[in-house]
Amino acid sequence: MKLTIQVNEGPYQHQSADTAYHFAKAALEKGHEIFRIFFYHDGVNNGTRLTTPPQDDRNIVRRWSELAEAHNIDMVLCVAAAQRRGIVDDGEAERNGKDATNIAPGFRISGLGQLVEGGIESDRLIVFGD
Amino acid sequence: MSDAKKFMYINRKAPYGTIYAWESLEVVLIGAAFEQDVSVTFMDDGVYQLTKGQDTTGIGMKNFSPTYSALGDFEVTKIYVEKESLEERGLSLDDLQHLVWEDEDEDYAEKDSIRLVSRAELADVLAGQDVLFNF
């Protein structure tokens, strides 16, 4: 089955960022295809490479990056949500005159249309949030 | 469009305590461009999003409630409001904005967008959808 996953909550504060990851991993292991993972609301905070959790804890951001690389997954941060919360890639830094970027490997910033397209193109859209 | 999917956006949270309501509305407005069969639901504390006379001056936040009246122009004409959610909060339809859309097939006659449904009826509506966005 072709899946799009929407992640609405940030890492560490809410379990849904963990649950979404475990679901995505399990779905891939079962042979399902992930069309896209779309991060919205505080979920965009899953995509900052500046996160530094304690060494004995899981690294949620790195975990996403590794999953994306291993399975060639399209991981999208909503641009409007990312701008509000200070998640920046090269293009956004240039457009908005910011002096730094913080997007993690494997993520890209794009519009809400990518979420709607995920709903259209996938057999199931699964939302993880509160 | 024959292969349009039935999209339902479910709003369950009050408008200003968290950003879900506003960022949900942004998805609905963007999604309208994709020519799908769109519906929107307001239930639980989400019914507060549609209350009229919202005034946010005291909290320093943007009052985005006027945007709901533009949904008709975006061809979002099916707005479900759960009856029990209103009643549990001491609200009635009179407390909500009067949302309308213009039916171009009937000489742009103004029609009500809000459909007041019971919890049981809403369950059937949701079961008939292809894609559920939950905010």
Image: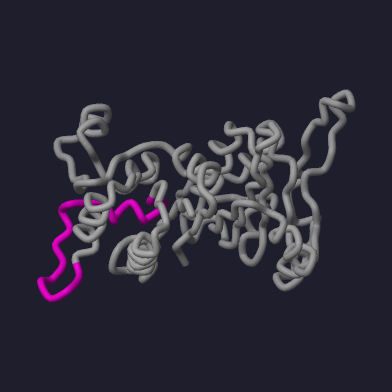
Front residue of B24 and A27: A27
Q: In the shown orientation, is residue A50 left or right of residue B34?
A: left
Q: How is the image coloured?
A: one colour
Q: In the shown orientation, is residue B34 left or right of residue A88?
A: right
Residue B120 sits above or below residue A51 on the image: below
Identify the residue shown where x is 22% and y is 33%.
A93
The quadrant of the picture occupied by the C terminus of chain B is bottom right
Corner quadrant of residue B12 = bottom right
Q: How many numbered markers are drawn?
A: 0
Tell me if I can see residue B129 in this picture.
yes
Residue A38, given in percent of the width and then of the height, sits at: 40, 49
- A42 within the magenta span: yes
Identify the residue shown where x is 56% and y is 45%.
B25
Q: In the shown orientation, is residue B83 left or right of residue B34?
A: right
Residue B68 sits above or below residue A97 on the image: below
Front residue of B54 and B108: B108
Identify the residue shown where x is 74% and y is 41%.
B77
**Range of the magenta residues?**
A37-58
Q: Residue furthest left?
A: A55
The quadrant of the picture occupied by the N terminus of chain B is top right
Residue B120 sits above or below residue A94 on the image: below
Q: In the shown orientation, is residue B91 left or right of residue A22?
A: right
Residue A113 sits above or below residue A55 on the image: above
Identify the residue shown where x is 78% and y is 44%.
B113
Corner quadrant of residue B36 = top right
Residue B96, given in percent of the width and then of the height, sits at: 74, 53
Q: Residue furthest bottom?
A: A56
Residue A25, given in percent of the width and then of the height, sits at: 33, 63
Tell me if I can see residue B59 in this picture.
no
